Structures are given as C-alpha cells and as structure tokens.
Amino acid sequence: MAISLAAAPFAGHRATERGRMPQAIGHRGYNAVFPENTMAAFRGAVEVGAHAIEADLHLSKDGVIVLSHDATLKRCYGLAERVSACDWAQLSKLRTLREPKQPVARLVDLLEYLAQPAQAHIWLLLDLKMHDNSTDMLSHLVTLLASIPSEPPWHQRIVLGPWNAEWVAACIRFLPDFPITLIAYLPAYASAMLPFPNLNFNLYNYSFATPSGSRFRNQAKEHNRLVFSWSDNEEEWMAASIHNEVDGVITDDPKRFLELCDQWSLEDVRERASKGTIKQTILWLIINGLNSFAGMISRLVQGSPESRVKEVLAFEL
C-alpha cells in the first residue's frame, strides 16, 4: 500500500536494567481508585507514575467530545440517556454514581491538563467508539487539537484507537500525522490488518491466550509493530504481558502494575504467567471457542477478513 502510518516511538516498551518492560497505561485513568474517565482518575494515574492515559470518546448532541466508555449515561451517571442525545449544558450538571462523585469530563479538559509542562511526558491513547459518525467525531477532534498547543506536539503524544478498517481509513484522512493502533477482540481481524504499514495493535488480553492470538502477537513483533494488552487487572495477566514483551499494559491499577514491575524477578514473572486461575482457564476456553466460531460465521457471511479489509481501504483511501 502507498500510505504508511506515522510511527509512535514514544509508546514503545521501556528498556530497563531488568530488561524489557511494558509501559503502564491507565485504563480510563486510575479506575481502581477513582470514577472512570473523570479528571480525578486521569490526574490520579499521572500522580502514581503511569506513562500514558487511555480515554474513551463520545460526541454530545452539540458537538462536545465527552469522555465516556458507554454510549449511555446509565451505568456511571444514573441517567437513562445516550451521550449523543444530551447537550453539554445538561451533561455538565451530572455527577458520577461512584464516590468520590465527579463531573463529566470533556476531552478539552484532559488536553488542557496534559498541555501543562509538568505533564509533557504523558501520552494519550484515544479509544474511538463506533457509536458516533467517524466524520463528525474526527472533524471535531481536528478542531480541538488545533486549539490547544502542546509541546511536544499532539501527534507525538497521541495514539488514535479505531476499532475497524473504516475508522482506520477515516483517521488517515483527518489526522494523517497521528499514529494508529487498531483495537480488536479477534486476532483474525487484527491479522488481516497486519499488512497495513506501521499499524499498531491493542488486543483484549484473553485473545493473546489463544493459539491464534499468540501467533498474531509474534507476527506483529516480527513486523516491528507496537502491541498493547487490555485490560490487565489481575497479577497473572500483568505477569503474562511482561513475559510476552508487549509494549504497553492497559490497566485499571497502574500503581500496582508498576510496583510489580519493580518487585518481580524474571523467574517470578515466568512462574506467575504460567499459573492462571480457574476463572481465567474457563474464560480462556470460552473465548477460544468464541474466536473460532465468530471467525467461521464471519467468513461464511462476509468473506475473509483479508478481503473485507482490502475492499474497505481501497474504497476509503
């Protein structure tokens, strides 16, 4: 393909005296302690030493980019409405159900915080939810990023996280200088995107435990792509990600992950990575089966992932 995505050296693994270590990426901030996707959670992640923050984007009715994992406000704020159905005046009055109660955060709030010199070392992974129209979301994102200066510039601090080929193509059109990591559940779909130059990958951690996920992880590393794992909240998964030499661990508890990185020997990592709980073993079996079944159905209905990806990218680009 003629187009090659921007590289993201700032998001790669850490070279330490103890060997290669993943970066600590706060999943929706410091979600283990603070309400997710709030400024308290983002500040908390930075204060405990996280190298990066992961945040989820949705668009309000009046075009404000709001930080929310869910398309609806019910789980976190108790309001049975979609984010897209509310304007900012309404959203700004909401407070989290979880203590300590926090207001809804906007991307502008997070960017203004990260633009401060004290936070210049922090980078940001933006999870681009597919509930919004890609053109609407990305055009607002372009305008917002241009309005807030950063040093280093945002394209050296932000990784875009789309979920499919259509959104990858849209990211390239609107923000061609920004690195991209595909977020995926299924290794088969990620594998179909591997030929795309410089595309990085962020996979559900249980997918890496499947044979196809393990093969894909090795292929991605052979192609010098960054690989992230989400969400590693149990010590066994943290150990597995260190052992597998991923570039970043996306976790609710970046403080605990960093502590374990300092405490564990390589022998501890190998031992813990090889242990899995009964729950993990059962889920691994279920997910492995679902991966195989979903792949089979998808191929029957839509053709191979490789053909779909080629068609989308050829049309979009």
Image (tube, grey):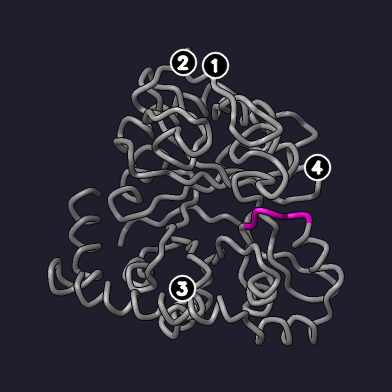
Nearer-N-terminus badge (2/3): 2
Magenta range is 251-255
Nearest to viewer (mark 1 / mark 4): 1
**What residue appears at the point 50 percent right and 37 percent down from the top-left corner?**
68
Single out the mark in the foreground, 2 or 3: 2
Q: Earlier in the sequence, mark 1 or mark 4?
A: 4
Quadrant location, the N terminus: bottom left
The local crowd at label 1, few if under 14, some if 14 to 19, many if 20 or more residues have their Cα within 10 Å, is: few
Q: Nearer the viewer, residue 187 or 278?
A: 278
Q: Residue furthest left?
A: 301
Residue at 71% across, 32% down: 100
At horizontal 55% and vertical 76% (from top left) the residue drawn is 279
Residue denoted by label 3: 207
Crowd rating for badge 2 (residues with CA inside 10 Å; few <14, some 14–19, many 20+): few
Tag in front: 4 or 2: 2
Label 3 vs label 1: CA separation?
39 Å
Q: Taking the image as drawn, is residue 64 in sight?
A: yes
Residue behind mark 2: 90
Q: Amino acid at mark 2?
A: Gln
For mark 4, what is the residue?
Answer: 47
